[in-house]
Image (cartoon, rainbow, N blue to C red):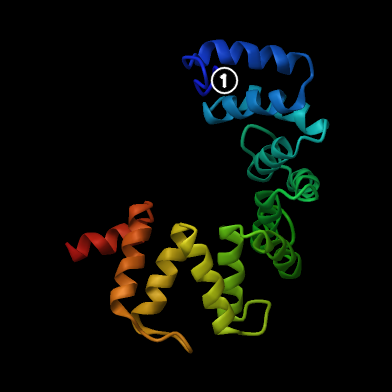
Amino acid sequence: MLRRGEGTPADKNEAARWLLRSAEQGYAPAQYMVGYDYLTAGRQAPAALWLTRAAEQGEPNAQTCLGVMCLQGDGVAHDPARGIALLSKAAGQGIASAQHNPGVTFAEGNGIVPDPEQALAWYRKAAAQGYAPSEFELGMCYRTGNGLPTDLARGHALIRAAAEKGYAEAQFSLGAILLEGEGPLAADPDASERWVRKAAARGHPEACRIVGLMA
């Protein structure tokens, strides 16, 4: 309430004090929120401390954040095995972003041996929940035949679904596809420009460059 100003004037400092008090008593959701606040403030060391405490109690959002930190070596030791283990635990509780991130790691081989089959399995789990980044990655795999039989129609549908959720990479890719058309998807220059402009509005760098050239 104090944090959002619900029924009382917002007081972030007072909210932080109560949140920390709750976290110090071992309440996992509060520990996650304290850790996340530190993380967004760029204070990785205390973030890792509180996220670890929450993750050890099975808090899925903390497991997700800490898992990503381990994969990236951000504020903690670069430890892909630990990162994937944490994300797997969160994924088992239905956290879509936790299902997506191991897919990226297995696809890119960030500190591990690349495993396209594992990547696709994780992307499918997150895409089944409508998670746009996974829909896009899975769509691109169908489009290019990367680990899957080429299926342009299915690939386009997944990329469009991600684009409609506001995922800039998907918006830009859909715009690029529509410029000249591809397989069953006919060229539509007007729609192409609309999608590129949407991607630019979300900060996609190449889309911004192209829109700048249109001006």
* Residue 51 placement: quadrant: top right
Percent x, y of residue 168: 44, 58
Above or below 22: residue 84:
below
Q: Helix or strand or loop: what does disc 1 sit on?
A: loop
Badge 1: residue crowd in 10 Å (few <14, some 14–19, many ≥20):
few
Would you say 150 lies left or right of 111 here?
left
Q: Residue furthest bottom?
A: 183
Q: Position of residue 90 (x, y in %)?
A: 76, 45
The residue under the point 43% across, 71% down is 174
Q: Nearer the viewer, residue 159 or 110?
A: 159
Q: Residue furthest right?
A: 57
Dividing the picture into quadrants, the one containing residue 195 is: bottom left
Q: Amino acid at mark 1?
A: Met
Quarter of the image with the C terminus in it: bottom left
In the displayed structure, would residue 91 be above or below residue 146?
above
Please report the residue visible at 69 percent of the width from the left and 11 percent of the height from the top.
Answer: 21
Residue at 40% from the left image edge and 65% from the top image edge: 172
Estimate the x, y position of residue 162 in percent, counting from the top left: 52, 63
- Is residue 30 placed above or below 188 in the rendered structure? above
Image quarter for residue 214? bottom left
Mark 1, residue position? 1
